[in-house]
Amino acid sequence: MQVRHPSRHRWLYRAEVAASAISTLLFVWTLLDPQWIERWFEASPDDGDGSAERWLVGGFFFIAAVLAAALARRERRRLAAA
């Protein structure tokens, strides 16, 4: 296994934490107000219902948040071991 420099681990860890936080924020925002996407892009694939945004886009943000958090946890463990 190739040993990476600890400063790269710290940078990667911070980027993954930021990605997780932003994805979580967008997920919660989508749950509370799914029409924000329609207002932003001026398109309504579900005729203003909000269900497409809530399930598709909200689901994407949820998966992105969980994945980024898992990657950040892995980097944190690598930092602790180094």
Image (spheres, helix red, strand yellow):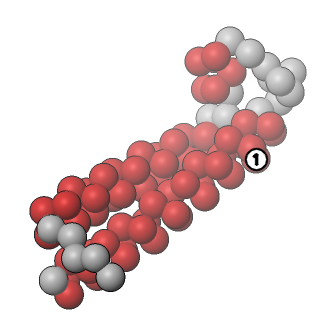
Q: Residue at x 61, y 40 (%)?
A: 30
Q: Give whichever of 7, 27 is nearer the camera.
A: 7
25 up-or-down from 52: above or below: below
Res 10 visible: no
Q: Position of residue 31 (x, y in %)?
A: 63, 45
Q: Which residue is drawn at 21% across and 70% down?
A: 4
- Residue at the far bottom in the pictured view: 81
- Residue at the far top in the pictured view: 42
Q: Which quadrant of the figure has residue 32?
A: top right
- Residue at the far right in the pictured view: 47
Direction from residue 69 to residue 40 in the image, left or right: right
Give the quadrant of the N terminus.
bottom left
Q: Residue at x 36, y 74 (%)?
A: 73
Report which residue position mark 1 lands on: 55
Q: Position of residue 45 (x, y in %)?
A: 83, 24
Q: Where is residue 22 in the image (x, y as percent from the top left)?
A: 42, 46
Q: Position of residue 54 (x, y in %)?
A: 72, 42
Q: Residue at x 20, y 87 (%)?
A: 81
Direction from residue 59 to residue 19 in the image, left or right: left
Res 55 visible: yes
Direction from residue 62 to residue 19 in the image, left or right: left
47 up-or-down from 27: above or below: above
Q: Which quadrant of the figure has residue 57?
A: top right
- What secondary structure is marked by label 1? helix
**Residue type pointed to by label 1:** Trp
